[in-house]
């Protein structure tokens, strides 16, 4: 039986496909403007703020980073601003390019926006809003206990999202804080070196992590019944 750790807390990041070895130096992923506020996080991650509680193997460069929040200059992108304003959003908590895994296992570069109320996934090549997920619909986030960039956002009423980002710690921290500020619900963070997620329809996939020399080996495969 696999060991599983559960904490209501926060996270870390990386980006490959099945059987890839992720190096520890990480794979790259990448003010009011018309009534929209862009908030940086509250500075460095301190010991008290670290939601990993010693479970997660952390990269040295992820322990005391200054969080910026907006890494893609959202105010300069008219398409992104139009999406946010149309949805009545008043603030952007996080914005950056990430890698998203499709149901077929392909990696697609996407823009991830996090606001006080929702998660937005946008195709930067076609300026298309691919998905909007209300934060209230999110049940938990799954991560490994190792030093990688993967995280799965579990949404029981829809299909889940598997992504990778070198700013995973900040992303999870922002999501947890957004839940705390918008409701009494506490976002659950599950740590396990093997977890499953719904890739769409009845397709269930399993992500496995293994520490190897030079990094972390990650394998994504269809979960057999």
Image (cartoon, grey):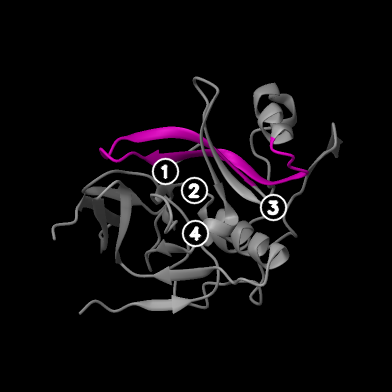
Left or right: residue 122 versus residue 149 is right
Sequence-earlier tag: 2 or 4: 4
- Labels 4 and 1: the sequence-earlier one: 4
User: Which segment is the magenta one?
Assistant: 87-114
Mark 3 burial class by Cα count in 10 Å: few <14, some 14-19, many 20+: many
Q: Look at mark 2 in the image and give the residue it sits on.
A: 166
Against 202, residue 3 (above or below) is below
Q: Is residue 213 visible?
A: yes
For the residues labelled 3 and 1, the Cα–Cα distance comes to 28 Å
Residue hosting label 1: 27
Whether tag 3 and tag 2 are in contact, CB under 8 A, the answer is: no
Tell me which residue sits at (27%, 53%) in the image: 218
Q: Main secondary structure of the magenta part?
A: strand
Q: Quadrant of residue 152?
A: bottom left
Residue 154, position as x, y percentages in the image: 43, 58
Residue at 65% across, 23% down:
79
**Mark sitting earlier along the chain (3/1):** 1
Q: Secondary structure at mark 1?
A: loop
Pointer 3 residue: 116
Q: Which mark lies nearer to you, 4 or 3?
A: 3
Give the mark toward the camera: 3 or 2. Answer: 3
**Residue 6, image quadrant:** bottom left
* First along the sequence among labels 2 and 1: 1
Number of other residues with Cα within 10 Å of mark 2, as a class: few under 14, some 14 to 19, many 20 or more: many
Name the residue tied to disc 4.
12
Query: Is there CB contact under 8 Å for labels 2 and 1?
Result: yes
SS class of the residue under badge 2? loop
């Amino acid at each position: 039986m696999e060991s599983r750790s559960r904490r209501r807390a926060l996270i870390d990041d990386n980006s490959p496909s099945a059987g890839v070895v992720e190096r520890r130096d990480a794979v790259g992923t990448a003010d009011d403007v018309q009534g929209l506020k862009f908030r940086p996080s509250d500075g460095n991650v301190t010991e008290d703020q670290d939601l990993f509680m010693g479970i997660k193997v952390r990269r040295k460069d992820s322990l005391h980073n200054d969080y910026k929040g907006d890494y893609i200059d959202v105010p300069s992108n008219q398409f992104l601003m139009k999406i946010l304003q149309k949805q009545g959003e008043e603030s952007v908590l996080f914005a950056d390019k990430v890698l998203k895994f499709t149901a077929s296992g392909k990696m697609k570069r996407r823009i991830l926006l996090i606001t006080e109320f929702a998660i937005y996934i946008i195709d930067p090549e076609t300026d298309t809003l691919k998905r909007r997920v209300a934060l209230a619909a999110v049940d938990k986030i799954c991560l490994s206990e190792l030093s990688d960039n993967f995280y799965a956002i579990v949404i029981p009423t829809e299909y889940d999202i598997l992504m990778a980002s070198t700013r995973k710690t900040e992303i999870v921290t922002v999501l947890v804080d957004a839940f705390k500020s918008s409701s009494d619900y506490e976002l659950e963070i599950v740590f396990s070196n093997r977890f499953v997620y719904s890739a769409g329809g009845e397709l269930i996939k399993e992500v496995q992590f293994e520490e190897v020399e030079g990094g972390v080996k990650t394998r994504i495969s269809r979960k057999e019944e």
